[in-house]
Image (spheres, rainbow, N blue to C red):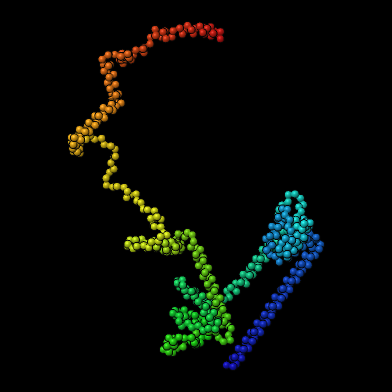
Amino acid sequence: DDDDDDSSLMDSSEDSRRRRKSRKKSSKKKKDKKQKKKKKRSSGKDAAKEDAEKDPIAARNYAVVDRLYDLMHEHPGLASELPIMLIRMTSGTSFDLRQMSDVSAAQGLQNVFASMSSLGVTKESSGGWTWQSPGAGTDELFLLRLTRSMLNQVGLTMEAVDDYYGMNNEKQLQEAKPTANAKSAVQNETLGLLSKFKPSMDKDSNPLSLELIALCRMILEGQSISLEGLPDDNLRDAMEDLFAKAGLEKSEMEDDDSSEDDQTEDDDNNEPSMGYALKDDDDSSSKKLLEVIEACEMHGKAASQREDSSEDEEDGPAPAGSQLAKRRVQQGPSLPPELVQAMAEKRKEQFDAVNGVQLPSNPNEREEWMLNPGEHDLLKGIKSGKVMKSRNFQNKKVSSHQVEQHSQPVVPEIQAQVDAIMAAHAEARGPSLMDQHRQKVAAQKAAASKGGKTDFNWSRDSDLDSGRRVDKDAVKMMLGSAASSLKDTFTGGLGRNM
């Protein structure tokens, strides 16, 4: 056994030496690559400087690029504001950089504008920076395009920038993949436990992830946790496995603050209670418990995001045949709780009214007939069973027999008094206008019958055709001397002369 232990120790030492050598070799290779890159950059810069010394335009371009690099490196937020400033400067706006609150940003912009002096950017006597147009009708994007062409000549093209950021993003993704997937065994065990035992539908109960976080924090504080009180055997076994992988120690618990009832029960049950706690002088178990807490927090965030996404998906119309449509058909339309409460109260009031229960009266509340409109049914007001009859007056003669049946006997003395009063009234009043007219018409008829024909005697048979027939004599009499008068007025030789 001792030989085996010595051999295992030798193997482990050799493996550690090999690892150290490989690490040294890899570090040397990295250093060599960095030095080569630095040499290339320095050689490129030297070549660029030599070109700049030979060509003044290239020197100006490199100076502008250096000032822009310094400005963007210290103040990256100006990357979106500087193009707008150049456009406004081209349109005639001047910028007084002394009014800026950030002094370093103002100094960087001043250096950039000073390097662009050969392009027409000048500083006024008032202290503002402006641009002098070389001629009329310049485009507002002139300075912006000119700056972009300068960057392109230096080599800072948009394609190069996109390639650079694309390569960096790919490197970041490749570096992030192993870190995202590199979860410890304890975290995988925790996530498996949380996914296996889903939380109950009771809203008052906390989810399992929060309860597990609370247990881990209690253990980190130095307390001992017993899992014997869990009703679910499967959950208890899973948590025991998790605590065992986390490196917790199962030991006997000390009940210092137990009550009398608990002491009597302990006397009946002599078995001691066991709980999980941290090991003495062992930091690995506490680190693993922190990993368990981190996994629980990750699981809780993912669950909340799924709930939010499901709530967002349930908004709006559901496609026909989808799971959401089937769920809505099963559950029915969702109503707000206030409306459901109001419907329940109104239903209770109707039920009490039918059963004759007297409702409590509120003096500040109006009665129902004041708030709700009354019920009206048009069909109830229509009579059925008989045909509607005409309501026109029916002129029927009443027989004397019916009048005698409906009439009542009159006292003779009273009738005599009424007749005397009517006669006296008629004598005092005299004849009416209608009676006078009738008398006049009757007198005229009597006089006509006695005297014979009157002045106007006309008969239809004899006098209708009289005066209608016209002969030659009548025509001559009517025309008279019209023909001779016409001849005197108009001469007969007028037509010939014409």
Taking 309 as reference, is 27 left or right? right
Residue 406 higher or lower than 272, as above or below: above
Side of 88 relative to 421 (left or right): right
Answer above or below: position of 68 versus 13: above
* The C terminus: image quadrant: top right
Relative to 65, is 220 above or below? below
- Asked whether 387 or 211 is in front, the reply is 387
Asked if residue 163 lies left or right of residue 290, the reply is: right
* Location of residue 112 by image quarter: bottom right
Spot occupied by residue 425 in the image (x, y as percentages of width and height): 26, 30
The residue located at (27%, 16%) in the rendering is 447
Of residues 39 and 424, the one nearer the viewer is 424
Q: Can you give x and y, in whole percent of width and height, for residue 237 in the image?
A: 47, 81
Where residue 226 appears, x then y in whole percent?
48, 83
Q: Quadrant of the N terminus?
A: bottom right
Q: Position of residue 22 (x, y in %)?
A: 67, 80
When asked about the image quadrant of residue 405, the answer is top left
Q: Residue at x 79, y 56 (%)?
A: 125
Residue name at image x 27 percent, y 21 percent? 442
For the question of whether residue 322 can be seen, the reply is yes
Residue drawn where x is 33% and y is 63% of the image: 357
Q: Nearer the viewer, residue 398 or 77?
A: 398
Viewer-nearest residue: 319 or 339: 339
Q: How many marks?
A: 0
The correct choice, above or below, for 88 with respect to 289 in the image is above
Q: Residue furthest bottom?
A: 2
Q: Quadrant of residue 436?
A: top left
